[in-house]
Amino acid sequence: MSDSAAASLDLTVRQAEDDDIPAIQAIYAHHVLHGVASFELEPPDQAEMQRRHAGTLASGLPFLVAEDRPGSGAILGFAYAASYRARPAYRWTLEDSVYVLPGAGGKGIGSALLSELITLCAGLGYRQMVAVIGDSANESSIRLHARHGFSDAGVLKAVGFKHGRWLDSVFMQLALGPGDETPPD
């Protein structure tokens, strides 16, 4: 994100609320139907997105939205953290997800969301954040994560099949707080 793009933003990143679910669902549905960032094939309905939102909050993790012009209610994107894996040894590691309104990419929205997500998760004591990026051709997501300090952690070749082609999963990783320098509290 360029400094001029960041300076021109008039948005608020805040915790998602129940009233945001229709906009979140619409953004995600577009990415499921037309993109490869998600390996889902059918977009979840609003009830399922509400369940996912509630589950994230019940886990004590952030689920954020970027709202255009504070108070306008226009949602430009969303981001959330989830447990990386269910087994107990993974409990200090999270996976991030960031989705931006179609046509609003490249304006710093994803960067604003990811920056706040990283800050909140580090503040909660988590030690690692993993990005599992749908497809090695998803350059915008790879660049977004690299700008925020994520490093390459590997590529799983051709592990998904969507829109008539095989897709890779790109793994990137960011240490949060002290990372692996000390044991967790």
Image (tube, rainbow, N blue to C red):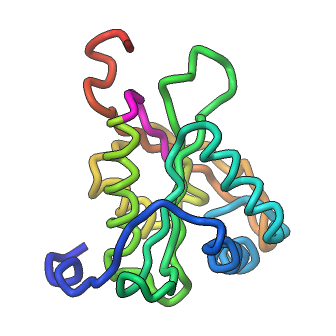
**Residue 147 visible (yes or no):** yes
Q: Where is residue 137? Give x, y as percent.
A: 52, 66
Residue at 50%, 49% in the rendered image: 62
Residue at 34%, 66% in the rendered image: 111
Task: Say above or below: 11 vs 147.
Answer: below
Compare residues 150 and 123 and report the one nearer the observer.
123
Task: Say above or below: 59 vs 141.
Answer: above
Compare residues 36 and 42 and report the one nearer the observer.
42
Report if residue 62 lies within the magenta region: no
Residue at 55%, 38% in the rendered image: 60
Q: Where is residue 3? Give x, y as percent.
A: 14, 76
Seen in the image, is 172 located left or right of residue 150? right
Quarter of the image with the C terminus is top left
Quadrant housing residue 1: bottom left
Bounds of the magenta segment: 124-131
Q: Where is residue 115? Give x, y as percent.
A: 32, 56
Residue at 41%, 39% in the rendered image: 173
Quadrant housing residue 162: bottom right
Name, please, the residue furthest toward the top: 183
Seen in the image, is 132 located left or right of residue 113? right
**Residue 137 visible (yes or no):** no
